[in-house]
Image: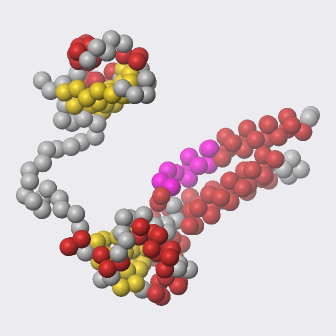
């Protein structure tokens, strides 16, 4: 069998086996991955790539290695759910790196962070003055959580005693020219009623709409497929 065909077959096996293992390990947002999770994922992916292109390697031995790494990740995650101490040992704990505007140099050194690294992380949080920071916490995943001093926090409607309306998730009624009938039913709107509102804006063909989204205030936002035309229609009864 030609070597190219062998690589193609092994790549297909590796791809779908890796997909299966990822599903078994479970969903987790990339932004919440700890460094340990990241290393485990890289290792499993590396083993999968070995299965794909290293044709001299035994297929079943490589698959077994992937299974063992995936099972270890699953077992450790399960133990971590049951044991707080174990979770702290494996994933680490959040550390207060700034308190009352004062930087903890020991935590900086322990995590091999320079002051430039810290300032860069603060700027991603729109903070340019350390004196504005009440607390900054270095999370297990390496991200920085920042609490500004009360005088530096933005005003909210509650601070001003301003009443606000409920704002929920918008509903996508049309996506890429296709009407979502289930979404229409969820907002008690018929297709005929939707088309009526569209025709008032001279939109005669639903297929010309890239996205139509209804918010909880009864405003229908429409983005046309021509990449330049948008509408906002009030469909309040």
Does the magenta stretch mainly form a helix, a strand or a loop? helix
The image shows residue 111 at horizontal and vertical percentages of 53, 79
Q: Which image quarter: residue 19?
A: top right
Q: Which residue is at 51% across, 74% downward?
A: 117
Q: In the figure, 190 relative to 38: above or below?
A: above
Q: Quadrant where the C terminus lies?
A: top left
Q: Residue furthest right?
A: 1
Confirm whether residue 19 shows in the render. yes
Confirm whether residue 135 shows in the render. no
* Relative horizontal placement of residue 97, taking residue 188 as reference (left or right): right
Q: In the figure, 203 relative to 108: above or below?
A: above
Q: Which residue is at 42% across, 86% downward?
A: 104
Q: Quadrant where the N terminus lies?
A: top right
Magenta stretch encompasses residue 26:
yes
The residue nearer to you, when weighing 92 against 211, is: 211
Q: Residue furthest bottom?
A: 106
* Relative horizontal placement of residue 33, taking residue 209 as reference (left or right): right
The image shows residue 173 at horizontal and vertical percentages of 32, 26
Magenta stretch encompasses residue 21:
yes
Q: In the figure, 57 relative to 1: above or below?
A: below
Q: Which residue is at 7% across, 58% downward?
A: 161
Which contiguous range is marked in magenta? 19-30
The residue nearer to you, when weighing 63 against 133, is: 133
The residue nearer to you, when weighing 179 against 54, is: 179
Q: Which image quarter: residue 169?
A: top left
The image shows residue 65 at horizontal and vertical percentages of 73, 57
């Amino acid at each position: 069998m030609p070597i190219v065909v062998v690589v193609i077959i092994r790549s297909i096996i590796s791809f779908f086996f890796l997909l299966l293992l990822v599903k078994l390990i479970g969903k987790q947002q990339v932004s919440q991955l700890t460094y340990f999770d990241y290393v485990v994922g890289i290792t499993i992916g590396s083993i999968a790539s070995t299965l794909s292109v290293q044709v001299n390697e035994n297929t079943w031995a490589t698959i077994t290695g992937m299974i063992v790494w995936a099972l270890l990740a699953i077992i450790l995650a399960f133990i971590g759910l049951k044991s707080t101490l174990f979770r702290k040992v494996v994933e680490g704990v959040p550390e207060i790196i700034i308190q009352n505007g004062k930087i903890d140099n020991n935590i900086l050194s322990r995590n091999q962070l320079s002051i430039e690294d810290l300032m860069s992380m603060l700027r991603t949080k729109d903070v340019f003055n350390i004196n504005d920071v009440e607390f900054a916490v270095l999370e297990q995943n390496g991200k920085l959580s920042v609490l500004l001093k009360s005088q530096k926090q933005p005003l909210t409607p509650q601070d001003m005693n301003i009443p606000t309306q409920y704002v929920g998730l918008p509903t996508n009624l049309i996506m890429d020219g296709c009407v979502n009938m289930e979404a229409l039913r969820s907002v008690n709107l018929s297709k005929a009623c939707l088309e009526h509102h569209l025709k008032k804006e001279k939109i005669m063909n639903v297929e010309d709409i890239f996205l139509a989204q209804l918010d909880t205030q009864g405003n229908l936002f429409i983005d046309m497929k021509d990449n330049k035309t948008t509408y906002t229609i009030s469909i309040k009864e």
